[in-house]
Amino acid sequence: MGQAAAVPIPPGPTERAIEGLLSTLRGKAIRPSDEAYDAARRVYNAMINRHPRLIVQCRDVADVVRCVNFARDEGLAPAVRCGSHSVPGFGTCDGGLVIDLSGMKGIRVDPVRRVARADGGCTWGDFDHATHVFGLATPGGIISTTGVGGLTLGGGFGHLSRRYGLSCDNLISADVVTADGRMLTASAAENQDLFWAIRGGGGNFGVVTSFEFRLHPVSTVYAGPVLYPLEKGAEVLRFFAAFMADAPRELSAFFAYLIVPPGPPFPEQLHMKTMCGIVYVYSGDLETGERITRPLREFGPPALALGHPAPYPAVQSMFDGLLPHGLYHYWKADFAGNLTEPAIAEHVRYGPQIPTVNSAVHIYPLDGAVHDVAADQTAFAYRDVKFTHILAAVSPEPGPMPEYREWVRSYWSALHPHSAGGAYVNFLMDEGDERIASSYRGNYARLAAVKRKYDPGNLFRVNQNIRPAAKA
């Protein structure tokens, strides 16, 4: 990345206006001339190299309200940052205002009511740390450094979703700062249209400063990876699809093509070897979990079959070391109705070409409790598909990324005719309006109407943007 001082900043607010904002804040404001700027502007995906006019590391809701009002009044596009995992780079912008929530990490757990409220800057690691001591959890992705906010607003699935639904399905209420600077509570009882929209509609409708979640009794789970030789890929995919079709909801498992990481728990003879595998997590009774998952460890036979009890937060963080901040990412994704034979053939063709140990080809199940919610009950519309896949090229270096990007694109193009049409918005890159609309199906028009009500000027546009509906 170049030095921040050498990058021209487009015209914007006067220094007097900026100083006026800074005088009202409790948090830290960082400008391009500040020594901390170059580090503060960096985000998770190193391919993103943007230069905001101002970065505000908010301390409280008052800071957020003042930032939203400033951005609106001064004509700046705000980018909202939580865990900053947004691979398209929506946690930053060129010439705009970054509203950085990452310092707002308060969490309050009510173990009697089985409810937790988390501030907008929390990661799932923060959340799991706070709830695990009470033997409680809620669905929240598979990487602990992911932001609670971004994941939930896009829907949010993880190891507990077949049993307990999406993150957004477990959302009870949220505090939202809207484009006009108001603080609104969105819930089943208040601002119901806004509550509907933020459950899958992304950051289009305001800055969510806190989330209230329903919790479930989850503490120790039975989990492990099972690895198979590449030549078994088609057989394993067929077995995986059939096994998951009848699996109890307590079981989550995903199929992967991977390069085996060079460290424990993997034996040295498998280090850096390209293989296929299944990673599973059983969140019910441990003895039952050992029995239910035994077919996964016996099929093949596998090259490696591990399974053991583990604390849920440990399972949630097991991929963190492979995906630190600062790597170069390019992703594409789709929903799939099922794993058809033509789709399996394309996975077998392209999956073994996975380029790096950090890269991922994952096929996640999206059934069970996810299907209990009607497609129009939340903004998240794909309630009838069985799987979603992600094809992610990830590299420590930028040089090979054009080649890796072409692998992802070719792989996706081969699979897309066998897909359900749209994609999980948290897996989308910056792919255009039609791709966004297809990912919301029949809910898109309603989302555009809610957008017109709460953000008619499209202030919150640094996201998978849903444009406000035109006035009738």
Image (spheres, rainbow, N blue to C red):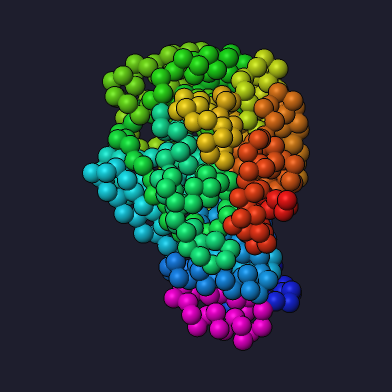
Place of residue 440 in the rendered image (x, y in percent of width and height, measured from the top left):
64, 38
The residue most toward the bottom is 16
Place of residue 350 in the rendered image (x, y in percent of width and height, measured from the top left):
70, 27
Q: In the rendered structure, does residue 290 fall within the stretch colored magenta?
A: no
Place of residue 104 in the rendered image (x, y in percent of width and height, measured from the top left):
42, 62
- From where the camera sits, is residue 131 visible? yes
At x 39%, y 49%, the residue is: 212
Magenta-colored span: 13-33
The residue most toward the front is 472
Q: In the rendered structure, does residue 32 fall within the stretch colored magenta?
A: yes
Count of labels in the image = 0
Q: Which image quarter holds the N terminus?
A: bottom right
Residue sitting nearer the eye, 348 or 449? 449
At x 53%, y 47%, the residue is: 193
At x 56%, y 38%, the residue is: 380
Residue 357 lies left or right of residue 306; in this view the side is right
Residue sitting nearer the eye, 229 or 129? 129
At x 29%, y 24%, the residue is: 285
Place of residue 138 in the rendered image (x, y in percent of width and height, measured from the top left):
38, 40
**Location of residue 342 by image quarter:** top right
- From where the camera sits, is residue 44 visible? no
Residue sitting nearer the eye, 410 or 193? 193
When the figure is inspected, residue 282 is found, relative to residue 195, above or below; the finding is above
When the figure is inspected, residue 68 is found, relative to residue 295, above or below; the finding is below
The residue most toward the left is 112
